[in-house]
Image (cartoon, grey):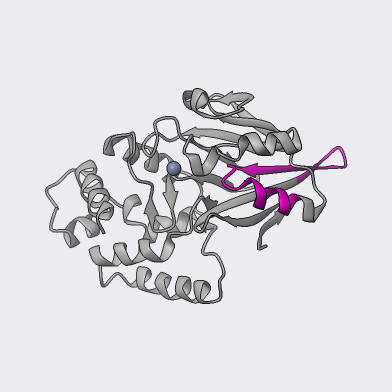
Amino acid sequence: MVKAFSKGIEIFLIPCLGDNQNYAIVGRESSQNIGFTVDSPDPQVITKFFESKNWNLDVILNTHHHWDHVDGNPQLKNRWNCKIYGPEYEEKRIKKIDFSLNESSTYQLGKHKFEIIHLPGHTLGHIAYYSETLGVLFVGDTLFSAGCGRLFEGTPDQMWESLKKLRTLPDETLVFCAHEYTLNNIEFALSLEPNRQSLLNFQNVSQEKRSKSLPTVPTTIGVEKEINPFLRADDIELKKNLNMTENSDVEIFAHIRKSKDTF
Ligand SMILES: [Zn+2]
C-alpha cells in the first residue's frame, strides 16, 4: 500500500472496488495508535489492511451516503466496534452512524483539528474533512483530480459554490479524492482546451504514474486550480476557448458538467 503522508499522522491509500480510493489514517493519541478510515467501500480490504498493520480501526469518517462509501459500515462496526461519523443531512441514509456532523462541528484527532466543510452538489449533504494544521482535505466525490462529482442531487449553482469554497483553501493543501478517475478527466479537460500546456504536462506526469500502477492522488488545491476546468468556470481563458464569453460562471460550469456526463 502506498503511504501518501507522514507528518504526525500517517495516511495510506487503499484502492477498493476497482476505482474507489480509500484512505487509512493512523495517528497516536496518549501513546496509542488510533486508526481511521475515510468511508467504507470494501470492508474486507479495509479489515485486511488494518490487521496486516496490527492497528485497530477506531473510527469511520463518512463523506456522503452513496453505497460505495458507506456499505461497509455494518460489517466494519461488527468487526472493530468502531465509531461512525457522517453528515447530519444524510444521517438517515447512513447505516450504523453514531455521530452526525455539520459545518459547526469539528473532529479532533490528537492535536489536529478537522473542520467539516458542507459541499452540496454531488449529494445534498456531502461533507469534506479538512485539517489546516496537517494541510489535508478528504473530499469524497466532490472534487476529483481534473474533474468533479456528478450532480446526482444538487444544482450546478450549489456545486459551483461548493467548489469555490474549496478553492479558498491554501494551494499546498493535499486533496484526497475518493476515486482514481484522473486520466479520463484529463482527456475530457483537453477536449475543451486541447492546447493548454499545463494540462498536457499534467497528462504526461499522470500517465507515467498510472503506467507504473501508482495513484495520481493526492493532488493539491494549487494544481487543481490550474488544470481542473470545474474550478475554472469563471476563468476568461476557458470562456474564450469555449466561445462562451457572454455566459455567466454558473452557466459555464453547468455546460461543462453536462458535457462531461456524456463524454
Ligand atoms: Zn458518490
Residue in the picture at 26% in, 59% down: 263
Quadrant placement of the N terminus: bottom right
For image coordinates 61% across by 27% down, the residue present is 96
Q: Is 125 contained in the magenta span?
A: no
127 with respect to 37 (left or right): left
What is the x, y in percent for residue 230?
33, 51
Relative vertical location of residue 100 with respect to residue 121 in this rendering, above or below: above
Q: Quadrant for ligand 1? A: top left
Tell me the quarter of the picture where residue 130 sits.
top right
Q: Is residue 15 left or right of residue 47?
A: left
Q: Residue furthest right?
A: 31
Splitting the image into 4 quarters, where does residue 6 fall? bottom right
Residue 121 versus residue 105 in the image, above or below: below
State left or right for residue 217 relative to residue 12: left
Is residue 157 shown left or right of residue 221? left
Is residue 57 among the parts visible in the rendering? yes
Q: Residue at x 40, y 55 (%)?
A: 225
Q: Which residues are magenta?
A: 27-50
Percent across and percent down for residue 219 are: 51, 58
Front residue of this view, candidates 87 and 131 = 87
Q: Is residue 177 above or below residue 106?
A: below
Please indicate, yes or no, whether residue 9 appears anywhere in the rendered image: no
Q: How many marks?
A: 0
